Image (cartoon, rainbow, N blue to C red):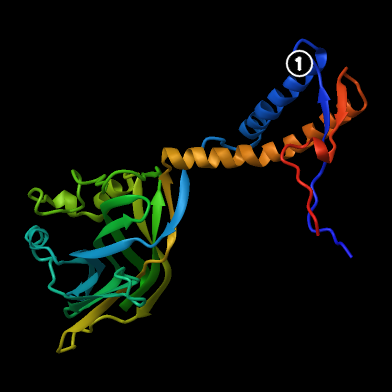
Amino acid sequence: MAVEVYHEPLCRRYYASRCSCAYFFFLLIALVGLILPFFLAYTNVPSFWLKTHTYREQPSITFQHKVLGTLQGTKKIRGIDRQMQIVFSSMTDVENLYGPELRVCNLQNIELDFNRDGITDEFHFTALCPLAKGETILGASVATFFRTKLSSRARVDFDSLAIAEHRDGMGGGSLFVDGDYMLKQKWPFRAKGGYYLPYKRFPLLDPSDHKIKLQETLLPNIIFGYRNRNNTLDYQQTYKVWTPSPGVPDNHGAYANFNLTMVLRVPQQDVLYTPTASEVLKDAWLKYLAIFVVVKYLLEFFASFVAYNQLVDTTMRIETPHEREGVKATSL
């Protein structure tokens, strides 16, 4: 008993001269099938030509061992609370600008790489500042400086800033801050060529570049200049814990300490970049092809209806198996 092993359709062919209405009608159908998907894709999608694109990457940060911090509070002098400020830093050039406000603090940091991929996942920083008699801390702020690199699609190398701060009406003995270090872009990165150094001429608080002035070490000025950049990393303080403390009493013989701890987490995040020409053409082709398939199916159905019902003059010829080229009899 024979069974079907393969089948193929036989065509119903329609013929017309090149000067007939049928020829120009089906030529118009072919042109519409090619042009209409382009206009539909161009007008119905937000942007037919891809201008920006995103991908996921975890920024690689390296601590530059540059720290600038301040403690604000009051100091009791002859029974009167007077405002005072303590400044601490890891940069000698910055320390030389401050006199009695300067305080030598114990600074410690550690960079953690949990998955051992060579990229820092967490950065822990601790500042232990000694307090004198009668000093009460009401606020604290610290700025840490990093070198940030992106190396997947966009290849960028720039310095970044992370600031943690808190103010409270009650005197405190410690401040714990935990947050994420997130990329913030006003302009996309480029995705071709070598490493791009956008802020090489304008580094953040760099003593090796020039002699630092006092105005450059003020946190409002540092933040203002940093925020003027198109691309930054912002430290988003998710949780803050302020531990109250009455301060150091006058009869306290030994020094007390204010403990400032900052935990900085670096997650994977979206990076905005300008796509290359090949990516733009590939994306446009996919948008065009998605609409072309639907348009072609509808036009094929319409053309079949017109030809079969002889709405335009054509000569129909039904194909038979023996008319095909290379047809051979197959014996089972």
- Residue 135 located left or right of residue 180: left
The x and y percentages for residue 161 are 28, 58
Give amino acid for label 1: Phe
Q: Is residue 176 above or below residue 57?
A: below
Identify the residue shown where x is 35% and y is 48%. Answer: 231
Identify the residue shown where x is 28% and y is 58%. Answer: 148
The x and y percentages for residue 287 are 61, 40
The x and y percentages for residue 71 are 24, 68
- Residue 79 located left or right of residue 230: left
Q: Is residue 50 visible?
A: no
Farthest top residue in view? 19
Neighbours of disc 1 within 10 Å: few (<14), some (14-19), many (20+):
some
Q: Secondary structure at mark 1?
A: helix
Q: Is residue 134 above or below residue 96?
A: below
Identify the residue shown where x is 25% and y is 78%. Answer: 258
Question: Which is nearer the eye, 299 or 74?
Answer: 299
Question: Which is nearer the eye, 257 or 233?
Answer: 233
The x and y percentages for residue 113 are 32, 75
Rendered-image quadrant of the N terminus:
bottom right
Residue 106 image-quadrant placement: bottom left
Question: Which is nearer the eye, 80 or 50?
Answer: 50
Q: Which residue is mark 1?
A: 24
Q: Is residue 7 visible?
A: yes
Identify the residue shown where x is 81% and y is 13%. Answer: 21
Rendered-image quadrant of the C terminus:
bottom right
Question: Which is nearer the eye, 196 or 297?
Answer: 297
Residue 219 image-quadrant placement: bottom left
Farthest right residue in view? 309
